[in-house]
Image (tube, rainbow, N blue to C red):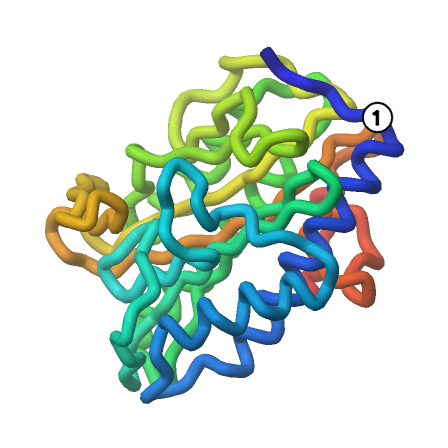
Amino acid sequence: MIIYKSAEEIEQIRRSNRVVAQVLSELRDMIQPGVETLELNRYAEKRARELGAIPAFKGYRGYPASLCTSINEEIVHGIPSKRTLRAGDIISLDFGAVIDGFYGDAAVTFAVGDITPTARKLISVVEESFYKGLEKAVPGNRISDISAAVQTYVESFGFAVIRSFVGHGIGFSLHEEPQVPNFGEPGHGPKIKPGMVLAVEPMISIGDWDVEILTDNWTAVTKDRSLSAHYEHTIAVTAKGPEILSQRAEDEDVVRTKEFVHA
C-alpha cells in the first residue's frame, strides 16, 4: 500500500533528509587516499546524532553499520572496515537518518583523487540519469516513466542499469511501497500523485548488470567486477512537480522540473 504524505509530514521528512544531505556533504571533504571507510562511518554516525537524528541503517535487517561504503565494483551495501581508499578509486556513500519517526535517504558517488575519464563519466551519467527520471516524477505519469527515463539515458552512453536493486517509497519507514525500478517500459505501475515520497536511486555499471553478493551477505558487486556508481535523492511529488528533500537548506532554491540548474 502506498502511503501518501501531507504537507506537514513532508516537512518532517525534509528535516531528516537535511541531516542526510549535511552528513554526505561533510563526508565529501574527507574523501582522500589513505582514509579508512570505518572512519567515514564513525564520522557519519557521530555527526548525525549531533544534528539530532538517529542513523537509519544501523541494525536495519541486521546491517552492522550506519553508512554504506561501496568501492569500485561494489554497487551497494558495502560494509565499512579498515580498508583504506586509494587514488583512482570511486566510492559510493549511502546514508539514512530518522528524526521523530520520519526517514531520509540519499547516496552519492565520489572520486578518490584522480580517476580515469571513464570512471568520471560513469559518475556524471548516474547523477544525470537521476535528473532524467526526476523530470517524469509528475502527477499523472506512471512510476515506470521514471524507470524508462533512467534506463534510456544510461544506456545511451553504453553503460548498464543494475536491475537487482530498486528505489522505493520512504517516509514513515525506510522502505515503503511503491518500488521504483531503474529500468522498464514507460506507462506502467502506480500513477504518480501528490503526496508520494520516493527514494529514486539509479545504480549503474560500466559492464554488465548481473550482481553477486559477497560472503558478508551484504556487499553487492558487479558479477563481471566492472565499476559501478550510485546516486540517490529522496523526493516529494507535489501538484507543481517533484521536489528534492535530501538537500542542504542552502541548496533548496529550486523545484526540479525539466529546466533544472544543478546545485
Name above or below for residue 227 compared with residue 60.
below
Q: Quadrant of residue 20?
A: bottom right
Whether residue 137 is visible to the viewer of this picture, yes or no, is no
The image quarter containing residue 88 is bottom left
Q: Nearer the viewer, residue 79 or 14?
A: 79
- Image quadrant for the N terminus? top right
Camera sees residue 249: yes
Q: Amino acid at mark 1?
A: Ser
Asked if residue 205 lies left or right of residue 230, the reply is left
In the image, is 21 to the left or to the right of 252?
A: left
Alpha-carbon neighbours of circle 1 within 10 Å: few (<14), some, or many (≥20)?
Answer: few
Tally the numbered discs. Answer: 1
Q: Secondary structure at mark 1?
A: loop
Where residue 163 appears, as percent x and y from the top left, is 31, 34
Q: Is residue 18 left or right of residue 152?
A: right
236 left or right, relative to 224: right
Closer to the camera in the image, 56 or 78: 56
Q: Which residue lies most toward the right here?
A: 8
Percent position of residue 254, x then y:
81, 54
Foreground: 19 or 234?
19
Q: Quadrant of residue 26?
A: bottom right
Write the residue at 29% across / 33% down: 164
Q: Residue at x 73, y 64 (%)?
A: 51
Question: Which residue does the image show at 49% across and 28% down from the upper left?
Answer: 180
Task: Determine the residue positioned at 33% across, 42% down.
Answer: 161
> x, y (%) of residue 158?
28, 50
Q: How far across and how far down the image is residue 4, in percent?
A: 73, 20
Q: Which residue is mark 1?
A: 6
Q: Which quadrant holds the C terminus?
A: bottom right
